[in-house]
């Protein structure tokens, strides 16, 4: 996303340490810069590893499977639906992939 000021300068990402220019679903916005909290707990590290597994598993799905998940998903993408289900199953100790 690029924010263009009156001088024609384009911004994308961090603007100093005060603002972030970005977009979400085609809507551009600027927000205050904030340093994210990152406690690096064991639980958080496990969740991040499971999230990475879920993304790789999504990429292994056929286009037909991805399209079906996109159709099934309500108010989110098929990717988000798949990753959410994958993480919930894996964190509960079950088999991650259906």
Image (cartoon, rainbow, N blue to C red):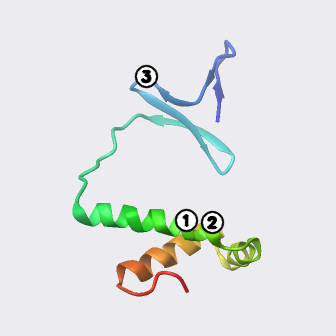
Q: Earlier in the sequence, mark 3 or mark 1?
A: 3
Labelled pair 2, 1 in contact (Cβ < 8 Å): yes
Which label lies toward us, 3 or 1? Answer: 1
Residue shown at the point (72%, 73%) measured from the top left: 62
How many numbered marks, from 0 up? 3
Where 74 sits versus 27, above or below?
A: below
Of 16 and 47, the residue lying toward us: 47
Mark 3 and mark 1: Cα distance apart in space: 34 Å
Identity of the residue drawn at 29% across and 47% down: 37
How many C-alpha atoms fall within 10 Å of the one at disc 2: few (<14), some, or many (≥20)?
few
Circle 2 sits in a helix, a strand or a loop, which is it?
helix
Label 2 – label 3 distance at C-alpha? 35 Å
Q: Give the residue pinned by disc 1.
A: 56
| Residue sitting at x 52%, y 82% | 97
Q: Element type at marker 1?
A: helix
- For this orientation, the residue located farthest to the front is 60
| Mark drawn on residue 72 | none
Crowd around label 3: few <14 · some 14–19 · many ≥20 (10 Å)? few
Can you identify the residue that label 3 sits on? Answer: 16
Q: Is residue 4 left or right of residue 82?
A: right
């Amino acid at each position: 996303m690029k924010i263009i000021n009156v001088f024609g300068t384009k911004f994308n990402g961090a603007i100093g340490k005060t603002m972030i220019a970005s977009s979400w679903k085609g809507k551009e916005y600027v927000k205050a810069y904030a340093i994210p909290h990152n406690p690096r707990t064991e639980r958080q590290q496990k969740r991040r590893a499971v999230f990475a597994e879920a993304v790789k598993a999504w990429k292994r799905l056929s286009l037909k499977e991805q399209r079906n998940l996109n159709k099934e998903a309500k108010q989110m993408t098929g990717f988000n639906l798949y990753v959410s289900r994958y993480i919930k199953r894996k964190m509960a100790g079950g088999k991650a992939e259906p």
